[in-house]
Amino acid sequence: MSAPQILAPQQPPSRSAQWWQHHGPLRVMFINTVMDVGGAETLLLNLVDRLRSPWFAPEVCCLKQSGALGPEFRRRVPFFARLLAHKYDLRVLPRLAWLLRKRRIDAVVTVGAGDRMFWGRLAAWCVGVPVAITALHSTGWPDRIQWLNRQLNWCTAGFVAVAQAHARYLIQEEKLPAEKVFVVPNGVDVERFLPGQPPPRLYQELGLSPEVPVVGIVAALRPEKNHEGFLRMARNVADQVPQVRFLVVGDGPRREELEELARSLDLQQHVLFLGTRRDVEELLRLMHVVVLTSHVEAAPVTILEAMATGRPFVAPAVGSIPELIADGETGFVVPPGELEIHAQRVVQLLQDAALRERLGQAARRRAERHYSLESMVRGYQQLLLGLFCRKRGVAPPPGLEELWSAQPQVVPAELPACP
């Protein structure tokens, strides 16, 4: 598969060096709506943290309130918030345009669809920002692209998908122009998410012992994550492995109804709802098996985190999940909605420690090889800098030859039919 032709015309090294010395680093503004705790927001935090370098100066703007992760962003990069007072606040456009002009932004990256995608790209066009791209992380809600947002495709330099199947979805279902769709796989911090034992205090906090088998799900309590399916699967597993415990990591407005469902399934002695946690890497080390039961997905970060931690995963064959999990090698991929099969795979792993160890080790190797945070950052560097250089007609900065000569991390989307 060949790389997209986004490199700029060649220039003499001395002229390129002079141009970049005068211009300075590429100033990139990432625009989101609110920074609540979630997979896309965590990815963005990792991305801007690693993107900072002599040639990249990332900044972040939240159209609404900063959210739970706002303080984390503020500690790392210039951060702006509260530009959009309400859904119909048209004054967001001059506010955002003023901010982009004042900060001398070279590239805008809108993270997700909706208002951030519309106002971010429109403001970028109004003030002449050279490059505007949209990074999408979901199939369907919340990244469903409505009619109004489609009208700005002409001024968008690229759309970022997180996997090949996701790219096919964006082209075939969302009708995005194929020549503008690029794939930058999600990445995980393999230095933070490491195999190992959880701290003893965690067992004490949760009232567990190391001998108890633990199954976990890490996902916001949203309808598409199908926690109802998880709980029904948990009932099946508990009938076969009575000592099992289940951890639900994540929060949301559906928590009360899900807790009620757990009680109705007589799972109150088996399930712990932990809410939002900042020690996910330690919780994953405590789990023997990690699962998802989602209706729809793109490329879930929780799968990558579990892989890096050396934990086998069981998940449905939706979205790009079959690209992430090598079925039978790093975990199991099951038919969507087949909760009995889902439960069988979980029980199989709980009852076979050698199988868990083999799949977990293979998962760790796969995460290191294909889904490191460094590879994701490299992909964004290549795409942003390449599009900017083409737009400005300049060569990349001196010293980044390796970035351009190495195997590209950004690849054009393939176009076979969706499975």
Image: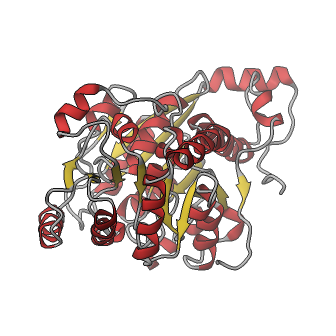
Residue drawn at 30 percent across, 65 percent down = 234
The answer to whether residue 198 is visible is yes
Instruction: Please state which of residues 43 and 214 is positioned toward the viewer in this rendering.
Output: 214
Image position of 394 (left or right of 364): right
Q: Quadrant of the C terminus?
A: bottom right
Residue 278's quadrant in the figure? Answer: top left
Image position of 265 (left or right of 59): left
Q: Quadrant of the N terminus?
A: bottom right
x and y percent of residue 179 in the render? Answer: 72, 65
x and y percent of residue 340 in the render? Answer: 41, 75
Instruction: Please state which of residues 301 and 347 is positioned toward the viewer in this rendering.
Output: 347
Above or below, 402 against 34 in this view is above
x and y percent of residue 296 in the render? Answer: 45, 71
Residue drawn at 67 percent across, 20 percent down = 21
Residue drawn at 39 percent across, 59 percent down = 119
x and y percent of residue 293 in the render? Answer: 40, 67
